[in-house]
Image (tube, grey):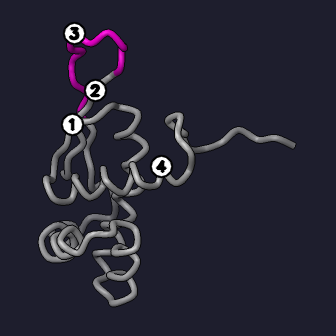
Amino acid sequence: MAYTKKAQTFGRPSNQRRALMRSLARSLVLEERISTTEAKAKAMRPFVERLVTYAKKNTLASRRLTKSHLGDDEAVKKLFESIAPRYTERAGGYTRIVKRTMRGSNDARKLAYIAFV
């Protein structure tokens, strides 16, 4: 029986979606706040929050997992040294999505900021 898919495809094959999430998550970790479309921000939220949960454990295995998901040493270092220690007492909900007003674009996409709380 065909069930509905859980994740949004964004009109891309799976390897391109994975690369999109990886690059958005890397930018979020390095910049701590990025502007993107609302749909991409909502799709990226569980991806990034899982990485922060790994980083809170601060083990070699969790460091390797985040490295495999992010693919960038600089982002992994920042995640483990400055971002994860902020959330040691927090059980979840490390990111916030703030909707932006529509700008004069002709494609009617909804824009949003995603940032760490």
Of all residues shown, which one is farthest toward the right? Answer: 1
Of all residues shown, which one is farthest toward the bottom? Answer: 60
Mark 1 → mark 3, Cα distance in angstroms: 16 Å
Task: State the image coordinates of residue 91 (x, y, percent, origin top left).
Answer: 33, 64
Pointer 2 or 1: first along the chain: 1
Q: Secondary structure at mark 1?
A: strand
Which numbered mark, 1 or 4, is in the foreground of this view?
4
Q: Secondary structure at mark 3?
A: loop
Mark 2 → mark 1, Cα distance in angstroms: 7 Å
Q: Which residue is mark 1?
A: 35
> 21 left or right of 1?
left
Kind of residue at disc 3: Gly
Mark 4 → mark 3, Cα distance in angstroms: 28 Å
Callout 3: 10 Å neighbours few (<14), some, many (20+)? few
Task: State the image coordinates of residue 81 (x, y, percent, origin top left).
Answer: 14, 76
What is the magenta range?
Answer: 98-109
Kind of residue at disc 4: Gln
* Quadrant of the drawing holding the N terminus: top right
